[in-house]
Image (cartoon, helix red, strand yellow):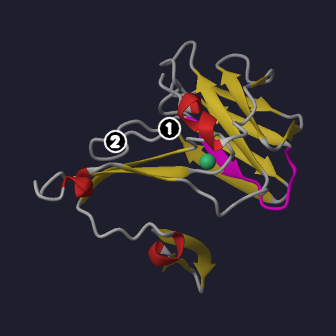
Amino acid sequence: MLRNEGEVSGQLRFTDVGLATGSDDLQDSRGFAVADFDRDGDLDLAVNHNPGDANRPELGQARLYRNELAQDKPWIALELEGTVDNRDGVGAVVRVSSGDLVQTRRLEAGSGYASQHGHRLYFGLGGSTEVHRISVRWPNGDVEELDQPLAAGASYRLRQGQVSSPEPMLPPASTPESADESVDRR
Ligand SMILES: [Ca+2]
């Protein structure tokens, strides 16, 4: 697990935080997926492992690492729905502006070995409590923009051809017990 420290002296710098975050298992990991499994606005981690040693079957169990490190930080999540392109909007590029911060994400598929990350795009907003501009470049090259504030702490669906009318989605799960039900199985 590496933390992006940003640019230092002209180069991106990363710090190993595996031990500090508790994600430094010694198991024979084979694939992982990043998604907000409990819908609280931060990204969690699922890791699967090679069963390997028949005498220690517990080592082959998949693990779900729940992120408890970024509580109460402003965030926003966007789910794309293609109507002309593929339904999930795979290949779209989304740019989100909040305050002076501009972030870009590309929605990808097949992102890891035997694994697939969640298809919602999550953006941490730094010190901002809202997003003031969103731009979506769909796979077919069409570009749509939303130029109105969107409140942080929520998920929105952006439909191709209707990005200017984002649809608020279900609120985050409030209890650990509801995490299983909140996994998007689409
Ligand atoms: Ca989460």
Q: Is residue 12 above or below residue 48?
A: below
- Residue 9 horizontal side relative to residue 110, left or right: right
Which SS class for mark 1?
A: loop
Q: Tell me the CA gap for discs 1 and 2.
A: 10 Å
Looking at the image, which is closer to me, 28 or 123? 28
* Residue at 35% in and 38% down: 110
Q: Is residue 143 above or below residue 29?
A: above
* Residue at 64% in and 19% down: 160
* Residue at 89% in and 34% down: 148
Circle on res. 118? 1
Residues tagged 1 and 2 counted as in contact (Cβ below 8 A) = no
Q: Does the magenta segment cover residue 8?
A: no
- Residue 123 horizontal side relative to residue 186, left or right: right
Q: Is mark 2 within 8 Å of ligand 1?
A: no
**Residue range (magenta):** 120-131
Q: Is mark 1 within 8 Å of ligand 1?
A: no
Looking at the image, which is closer to me, 68 or 169? 68
The spot of residue 108 in percent (x, y) is: 45, 38
The spot of residue 52 in percent (x, y) is: 13, 55
Looking at the image, which is closer to me, 97 or 46? 46
Which SS class for mark 2?
A: loop
Mark 2 belongs to which amino acid? Ser
Mark 1 belongs to which amino acid? Gly
Q: In this figure, what is the number of numbered marks?
A: 2
Which residue occupies the extreme left position in the image?
54
Q: What crowding class fits label 1: few (fewer than 14 Cα within 10 Å), some (14-19), or many (20 or more)? A: many
Circle on res. 115? 2
Q: What crowding class fits label 2: few (fewer than 14 Cα within 10 Å), some (14-19), or many (20 or more)? A: some
Split into 4 quadrants, where in the image is the N terminus?
bottom left
Which residue occupies the extreme front position in the image?
55
